[in-house]
Amino acid sequence: MARQLRAEQTRATIITAAADLFDRRGYESTSLSDIVDHAQVTKGALYFHFAAKEDLAHAIMEIQSRTLRDVVTEMDARGHSSLEALIRITFGIARLSVESPIPRAGLRLATGPVEVRPPLTHPFNQWRDIAVRRLHGAMKESDIHPDIDVEAVAHALVSWFVGTRVVGRSLEPVARQPRRVAEMWHVMIRGMVPVTRRARYLNLASRLEREIRPT
């Protein structure tokens, strides 16, 4: 049991170290030797868990996908409206990006040269499908205008969310991400939520940004 626990801890250490380097340097600019040095493990320990750098990348994306499903499940269990759940999901992802290199690396890998292998769904498709379902729910709940093109809004939301991080990687620290998510929602809410319901969601976005803003 103790040996298994040590192996799991070593695997987690390697994944976190790889994620940190993939996020900061990029996948192609990071070697397995870099990861070994950063994780402070032996090459044998790394190869025991991962046969190639691509396997590490897929492990990171699998964790990212599983974490997103956990966030969605948690928000759905709280009984929020569909639009509130969607807003909270995006801030939940932003919080994780601030706290851990794995979501940041997962996003960078999704925009890079690593092919997503089945049965894993591409992260952007996963995020879009989550948005589509909640936007359809929001339309049924009269929280967004009935003539909204849900597919177009979902695509725009994912593109905006991903784009703020891609641009921000070069221009500002990741701690700025929650603020960018709030700015995104302030624009989108004004465009698709009826005036009588708008204040509720604008206030929600502002409050969530304050709650996860690093101190």
Image: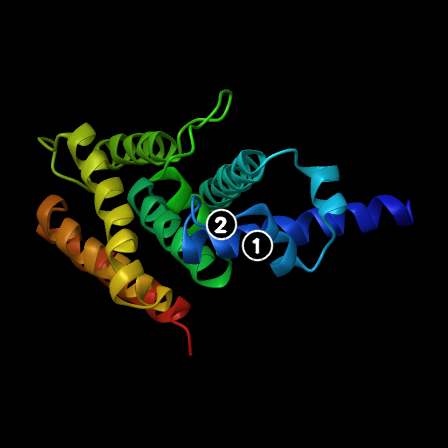
Q: Nearer the viewer, residue 104 or 38?
A: 38
Residue 80 visible at all: no
Q: Residue furthest top?
A: 118
Residue drawn 11% across and 38% down?
145
- Residue 46 rendering spot, x and y as whole percentages: 70, 44
Kind of residue indicated by mark 1: Asp
**Residue density around tag 1, few if under 14, some if 14–19, many if 20 or more, within 10 Å:** some
On screen, residue 9 above or below 155: below
Check disc 1 and report its element: helix, strand or loop. helix
Other-residue count near label 2 (Cα within 10 Å), few / some / many at <14 / 14–19 / ≥20: some
Q: Is residue 121 above or below residue 85?
A: above
**Circles 1 and 2: CB atoms closer than 8 Å:** yes
Q: Which mark is residue 70?
A: none
Nearer to me, 3 or 160? 3
Residue 145 relative to residue 138: left or right: left
Tell me if residue 172 comes above or below residue 80 in the rendering. below
Residue receiving disc 2: 30
Image quarter hosting the C terminus:
bottom left
Q: Residue at x 14, y 46 (%)?
A: 193
Q: Residue at x 30, y 54 (%)?
A: 165
> How far, Cα to Cα, is label 1 from label 2?
6 Å
The image quarter in which residue 107 lies? top left
Residue under numbered circle 1: 34
| Horizontal side, residue 149 vs residue 68: left or right | left
Q: Position of residue 104 (x, y in %)?
A: 43, 52
Q: Out of 191 and 59, give the one closest to the viewer.
A: 59
Residue 126 in the image: state x and y as whole percent: 38, 31
Can residue 44 be seen in the rendering of this structure?
Answer: yes
Three-letter code, disc 2: Thr
- Name the residue at 42% across, 55% down: 25
